[in-house]
Amino acid sequence: MLTVLPTDTRLGELWPDIWQATGETLLMVALTMLIGGTLGLLLALGLYLTRKGGLYENVVVSVVLNVLVNFFRPIPFIIFIAAVQPAARLIVGTGIGFSAVVFSLILASMFGIARIIEQNLVTVPPGVIEAARAMGASRARIAATVVLPEALAPIILGYTFAFVAVVDMSAVAGLIAGGGLGSFAQTFGYRQYDPTVTWVCVLILVALVQVIQLLGNTLSSRIMRR
Amino acid sequence: MTHPATVAEPLVRLRNVTKTYPAARGRNEVRAVDDVDLDIAAGDIQAIVGYSGAGKSTLVRLLNGLEPATSGSIQVGGTELVGLRERQLRPIRLGIGMIFQQFNLFESRTVWGNLAYPLQIAGVAKAEQQRRISELLHFVGLPDKAHTYPRNLSGGQKQRVGIARALTTNPSLLLADEATSALDPETTHEVLRLLKRVNEEFGTTIVAITHEMEVVRELADHVAVMENGRVVESGAVYDVFSSPKQPVTRRFVGTVVDDEPDAEALAALRSRHPGRFVKVELREGGPRQTDIFAVLLERGISFELVFGGIEEIQGATFGNLTLALDGPETSVDEAVRELAALVTTKEV
Ligand SMILES: Nc1ncnc2c1ncn2[C@@H]1O[C@H](COP(=O)(O)OP(=O)(O)O)[C@@H](O)[C@H]1O
Ligand SMILES: [Mg+2]
């Protein structure tokens, strides 16, 4: 394989670093999905339950949450990461590096995830919720044992979508020396005029996204088909 | 009639019940239920019939507190529901089952899981849950579907699961909101028979909403007719069918039993049949067809049945027959007079 590559690439010696960068990306994305995904889910439940006709209908909370989400969600991550640097310093103790990136990713992703999951939750037919109410279920029980399980298949697709978006966002980490494949490709591919390295990083990212997408689709349709 | 006379307190007692939906953007205030009084005896099957938007669903949702009433009194089993909070309503709802037009099964749970859900809410022990679920699956004829997901069931099977699920906690009252409206006629018939069995074997009182008079005829003991949020007519099914008073009731009754031909049908009939048209009303316990025909035969009047027929409702027969009478003027006059003395008649 290496014989077909241009001879002026440093790919051969960079492999260990590429794998490390891949590991960083995976960790970054996994932490973001774990924490940002959980916070996003809670926010989504807040949006869903307090909306008009919701189980905990509450205009004030609903408006506050919507304004919050609508304010943060459209900010491009490359700007967001710089804008939240002071907050990162305050909370994770540093404005640069891996933890600062993860902090920014979590913050940025949870608003997007909240909106996606909210859209998944509204697919649950109101009649099913009404049936549970008619059986004497409490509102909290309905949220946990009816709304979430009934929306599970679309929620998995929603998280899959978010996962891919977070992989994309994580590439900006280089801006604050956060590591990962994105910054590696910039440093050792783009800036060193080594397109082979760039393309290897791209292919690894593409493979990662493909695997996630496939897993998400399979899982979701398995749930949908039963 | 076929059901015992109402004794003691009714299971459901509504007095001056009104439900108003407040005005919202682009919509005026809606008085969905307007000053309704209704008593439903324990063990009865009460149908509520009316056109779309009459307020039937709203009324039935007041009975388990899914919607709070704006004013009036709603008692179920002696407990006043109006003014109760959601938390206080929950234990009461365990004693009130509900089934729906769209079935509203939990798609993420198997049939077994669907039936287990209300039992979990009621805090029933695992072993008792199992006993109850398998008993009910046998009752509705789906013992082999326990581990099937709802999406793999037919409409009729889904509704049978819905019924089983509504019965798990042994409710004394079962609310059915258009339970057969999404089903084909044959499946409708099966589901109605099942509901009848629920009523007979468990003594469950049923409140069934429908816009189909056929459902009322096949299922109900009593019927209330709603229009614009009001109950405009109510009574035993036979009585309402045999002598509807309100125009809306007549229209409904007319969908299953012929009353008299309308103007258009009448014109068509007249062009084909000579003579005078007389509608005679046959009622259970009154003169029978043979008695009517005897009067006509006696006078040598030739007659023909041009419209209507004999129906059976709750085991009692009645019919509205429109006869074309042909013969000498005076004989027909006499015959019509004599018929009028026997039964209710009307020249059409
Ligand atoms: N949640 C609601 N908010 C506002 N208006 C409603 C609501 N539910 C029903 N209505 C109105 O109340 C009236 C009666 O509706 P409904 O009880 O559903 O009638 P039916 O079941 O007889 O078709 C209709 O005019 C309907 O538009
Ligand atoms: Mg309705």
Image: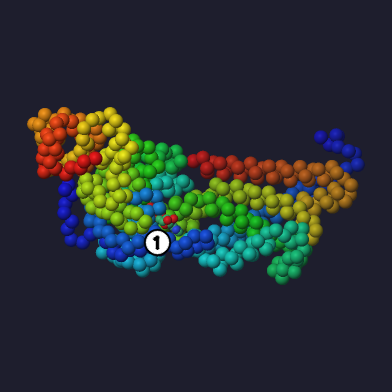
Q: Amino acid at mark 1?
A: Arg
Secondary structure, mark 1, is: strand
Q: Quadrant of ligand 1?
A: bottom left
**Residue shown at the point (18%, 49%) measured from the top left:** B3
- Which one is nearer the viewer's eye here, B12 or B174? B12
Question: How far across and down, in percent of the image, does residue B136 sit?
Answer: 31, 45
Mark 1 C-beta to ligand 1 under 8 Å? no
Residue highlighted by disc 1: B31
Residue B8 location in percent, x, y? 18, 61
Nearest the viewer among B48 and B247 is B247
Expressed as whole percent of the image width and height from the top left, the position of residue B35 reads 32, 63
Q: Is residue B223 left or right of residue A41?
A: left
**Residue B170 appears in the rendering:** no
Residue A129 image point, x, y percent: 45, 54
* Residue B326 visible in the picture: yes
A191 and B242: which one is in front?
B242
Q: Residue furthest bottom?
A: A90
**Which class describes the residues within 10 Å of circle 1: few (<14), some (14-19), or many (20+)?**
some
Q: Residue at x 18, y 42 (%)?
A: B345
Left or right of B210? Residue A107 is right
Q: Disc 1: which chain?
A: B
Quick check: B172 above or below A60?
above
| Nearest to the observer: residue B278 or residue B283 | B278
Residue at left offset 52%, top offset 66%: A58
**Residue shown at 66% from the left, 53% from the top:** A30
Q: Quadrant of residue B111?
A: top left
Residue B40 to residue A16: above or below: below
- Residue at the far front: name it: B329
Q: Quadrant of residue B327?
A: top left
Q: Quadrant of the N terminus of chain A?
A: top right
Query: Going by the image, does A219 lie left or right of B93?
Result: right
